[in-house]
């Protein structure tokens, strides 16, 4: 179900970044050696933006779509040290 999971996550990420002003960044990657090990890195303007995000229609759709695909989930709250990017840089999935 990896392709289905990736499609659901991509749809969700695109909607979150486009629609929600408090979602600043949403990156999703998988381990090349273990493609079912997915890491999602999310940056929000503040905790209120995160709280609003998890109540959106697109987030709830994503969660219900992937509920039988995700076997474990670990949420880690972090403090950034450095986040830099070139202006206008876009990453496209192959």
Image (cartoon, rainbow, N blue to C red):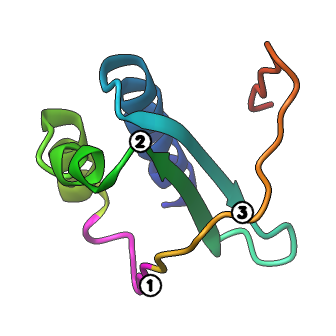
Residue pictured at 28% horizontal, 71% vertical: 68
Task: Compare residues 82 and 60 and report the one nearer the observer.
Answer: 82
- Asked if the stretch drawn in magenta spans residue 69, the answer is yes
Residue labelled with disc 3:
30
Residue 3 lies left or right of residue 80; in this view the side is left
The vertical placement of 27 against 72, above or below, is: above
Q: CA distance from mark 1 to mark 3?
A: 15 Å
Task: Compare residues 77 and 63 and report the one nearer the observer.
Answer: 77
Q: CA distance from mark 2 to mark 3?
A: 25 Å
Q: CA distance from mark 2 to mark 1?
A: 21 Å
Residue pictured at 47% horizontal, 76% vertical: 77
Residue 92 lies left or right of residue 60; in this view the side is right
Q: Quadrant of residue 61?
A: top left
Residue labelled with disc 2:
45
User: Which region of the structure is painted magenta?
Assistant: 67-75
Residue labelled with disc 1:
74
The vertical placement of 43 against 10, above or below, is: below
Task: Compare residues 27 and 63 and report the one nearer the observer.
Answer: 27
Q: Circle 3 sits in a helix, a strand or a loop, which is it?
A: strand
The percent coordinates of residue 21 (x first, y second) are 35, 24
Label 3 Cα neighbours within 10 Å, binned few <14 / some 14-19 / many ≥20: few
Is most of the magenta stretch helix, strand or loop?
Answer: loop
- Asked if the stretch drawn in magenta spans residue 27, the answer is no
Label 2 Cα neighbours within 10 Å, binned few <14 / some 14-19 / many ≥20: few
Q: Circle 1 sits in a helix, a strand or a loop, which is it?
A: loop
Q: How many discs appear?
A: 3
Q: Who comes first in sequence, dot 2 or dot 3?
A: 3
């Amino acid at each position: 179900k990896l392709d289905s999971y990736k499609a659901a996550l991509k749809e969700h990420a695109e909607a979150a970044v486009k629609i929600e002003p408090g979602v600043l960044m949403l990156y999703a990657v998988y381990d090349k050696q273990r493609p079912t090990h997915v890491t999602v890195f999310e940056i929000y303007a503040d905790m209120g933006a995160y709280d609003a995000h998890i109540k959106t229609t697109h987030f709830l759709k994503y969660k219900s779509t992937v509920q039988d695909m995700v076997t474990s989930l670990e949420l880690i709250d972090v403090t950034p040290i450095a986040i830099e990017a070139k202006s206008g840089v876009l990453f496209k999935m192959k």
